[in-house]
Image (cartoon, rainbow, N blue to C red):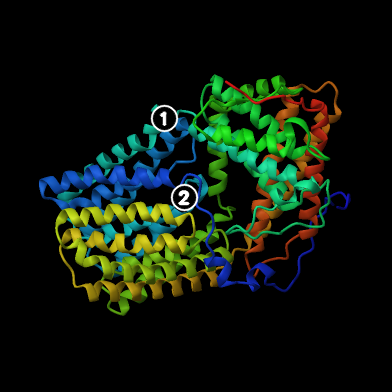
Amino acid sequence: MSDTPARPGRPSVRKLPQLPSAVRGLAPASALRLSRPSDTWFKPALSVVVASAVPHLTLLAVGRLDLIVYTMAGSLCALYGHGLPYARRARAVAGVVLGMAAGLAVSLVTASLTGSTAVLIAVGALLAAVQKVLCDATRIGPPGHVIFTFVSSAALFAPQRLGQIPGHLALTLGAGAFAWLVALAPALVRREGPERRAVARALEAAAVCAAARDPRDRSAANPGPRNRDAADPGPRHHNAADPGPRHRHAAAAAVHAAWQCLLASGRPTPVRRSLERLVVHAEEAFVAPGPATGAAHPERLRAWAAMTRGRGPVPTPPPAPGTADELYGIDAERAVLRAREGRRAARRALLRRLGPGSPLLPVAVRTLIGCALAGYLCAALGVGRPYWAIVTAASLYQANITLSWNRTLQRTLGNLLGVLVFAAVLPVSRISPLALVCCCLFFGFAAEALITRNYWLGSVAVTPMALLVLEFGGAHPAGELIGDRVLDTVLGAATGFLAAALVTNRRATGRVEQALDATDRARAAAERTVADPAAAPTERDRTRRALTASLVELREAGDTAAGEWWQRALPEQRLLAAERAGHRTLAATAPRRGPAAHAPSIGAE
């Protein structure tokens, strides 16, 4: 790799717009390819079944299945927060429940005050845009804004009176409170579970990165194709000492996520202390130049990852120079984040993501226009449930046009196959109310079990579940339901993607430039602390983590902009040079720890 430093000047801007290669190569095969299931797919799947089963069966016992749509709004909140430590999950899921109730309240009040389809569609599109922006800004998800939009849009077209609203909202809040308990229940058995999984992922990613530097272990460095939404630049001329940008970025992102999870996990415990030491070794294996040896050897990192992910004791890594200083720095950083000023800084960062210059605003405009067009077009064609088209359009909008195109293909295929599944199971669901409840619970589980393989596969289960919900209010002609759903899917997908193509996101390149400047500042700060013998170890570790975070943000901004079209030319050379310089600076921080100790055995705490 070239050692040319990043140029501080601003990139040139072409006068004519261009289509990036990522957009010119919109390949259906890659969008529909199945990937490995998530390592935690069963957690949201089981959570939503438990959170839904109790309210469903309670309403079945009292003979009020027509109210399931309101309890389901709260039960679906159990899908959120499964990657967060329990201390943060408690706040996040509580916020999801309140946000779900707020959106539902707006829809119910609107439905009770007007029967105008035009007004209802406008309110539904506006709610979808607001929900999209808030979910992206707070980074809550998956499943993100789609569940909120599904609930609020469906409620807009349900008959409603003002006097019924308090009772219906109480059902949602009650089911949401139970979903909150379900989401936090695993803490009683394994309170460091999310942290263990995050650290295990960091160890695995560091092992792949370390193996890529060792020509004797190339098979482990190339685990096979993955289904990725973001553009993947692929390896570039790497050698035995260079793991390549793809492996470096994956390791940096995993290590950064592990530190963030541990910082948000609450007070230190013996288990969390061992996890922090493991992340120190994962970070060392990721940033260290040259072949991996000792505790940073790929096989040892994989063994630690397996033990960390398992139910046994957390492995105790060997001591490494600088570990005590880094753990002290983590404690100091955790204290700052939990202090009043740290919370204020987090709120200011959130407001910046929602501010006038936010790159999220063009996506919000896409969502607003696309959902409105889809709803009005379906209403003009006489479709009785235009909210299906609104939800279809809302589900398409991802970080850029390439990902939105992929989601369009996935959503359309999944919904069309899903209506066939619905036609097959409808006779079974009409055997009895209990059969209907069981079918909904089964498809709720199947959706979460399959959606991590690919979105279209999960949609095959989501579609019949959404159609079966209508059966709780009374039987409907099967042909009418299937015909409306097919028409809504096709029209919603077509108009939704058309809006994504017409509403450009020219701020994507600006986000890259801001990330480049932030990376340059973080790299300069890290270089100053490494070169200063009087710098405190805690300051060195803090600047190194800040540099890692800036590199993760830079790659995310670059991948997002690479999938957009009709924008300024990307500063690709400056981006690549900044990444190389940043990773060289990270590597320069490794020697200060000294060589990693060779561990004769893997202990347990």
Q: Amino acid at mark 1?
A: Ala
Give above or below for 408 relative to 284.
below
Give above or below for 273 relative to 548.
above
Give the residue at mark 2. 142
The reply, left or right, for residue 166 in relation to residue 301 is: left
Give above or below for 263 relative to 389.
above
Task: Decide which of tag 1 and tag 2 comes sooner along the chain.
Answer: 2
Q: Amino acid at mark 2?
A: Pro
Q: Quadrant of residue 332?
A: top right
Instruction: Tell me where residue 555 appears, x and y as whole percent.
Output: 68, 51
Element type where label 2 sits in the image: loop
Please give the name of the residue rendered at 61% of the width and 22% of the height, measured from the top-left corner.
331
Between 67 and 60, which is closer to the camera in this rendering?
Answer: 60
Between 223 and 286, which is closer to the camera in this rendering?
Answer: 223
Kindly identify which numbered label has been placed on residue 187: 1
Quadrant into which the C terminus falls:
top right
